Image (cartoon, helix red, strand yellow):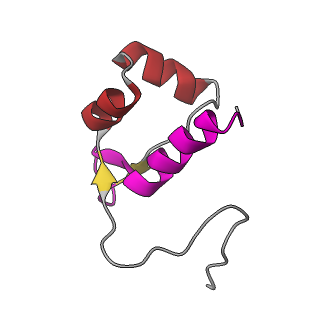
Amino acid sequence: MVKTEQPGQQKQAGNVSIVRHNLVRQKLQISSAKLFDMIAKGEFPKPFPITPGGRAVGWLESEVDNWILSRREGGA
């Protein structure tokens, strides 16, 4: 399977950081309920499973940061 780069994505170089729910909430300065609501409405990216079959999920920190920057630029 060949992984292609999606429009608006950049190749990751160096370390890749995964952020968990609490850190995302802190970065966005919102409650858990608001974060879950935004995900359900498609207003924020869904997290991905960190381990196969596990319950732990997270986001790439770069994806969260890019979402924040897009809000600043008026792309919401």
Residue 7: where, in percent of width, then height?
A: 73, 64
Q: Quadrant of residue 62?
A: bottom left
Relative to 38, 57 lies left or right: left
User: From the image, which quarter does the N terminus lie in?
Assistant: bottom right
Relative to 10, 35 lies left or right: left
Instruction: Identify the residue at horizontal 64%, vertical 31% (top origin).
Output: 42
Residue 53: where, in percent of width, then height?
A: 33, 54
Instruction: Identify the residue at horizontal 27%, vertical 45% (top origin).
Output: 56
Magenta span covers which residues? 50-75
Instruction: Identify the residue at horizontal 56%, vertical 34% (top origin).
Output: 44
Q: Height in image: 67 above or below 40? A: below
Q: Nearer the viewer, residue 72 or 21?
A: 72
Does the magenta segment cover residue 69?
A: yes
Residue farthest to the front, as pictured: 73
Does the magenta segment cover residue 53?
A: yes
Q: Quadrant of residue 14?
A: bottom left
Residue 59: where, in percent of width, then height?
A: 40, 49
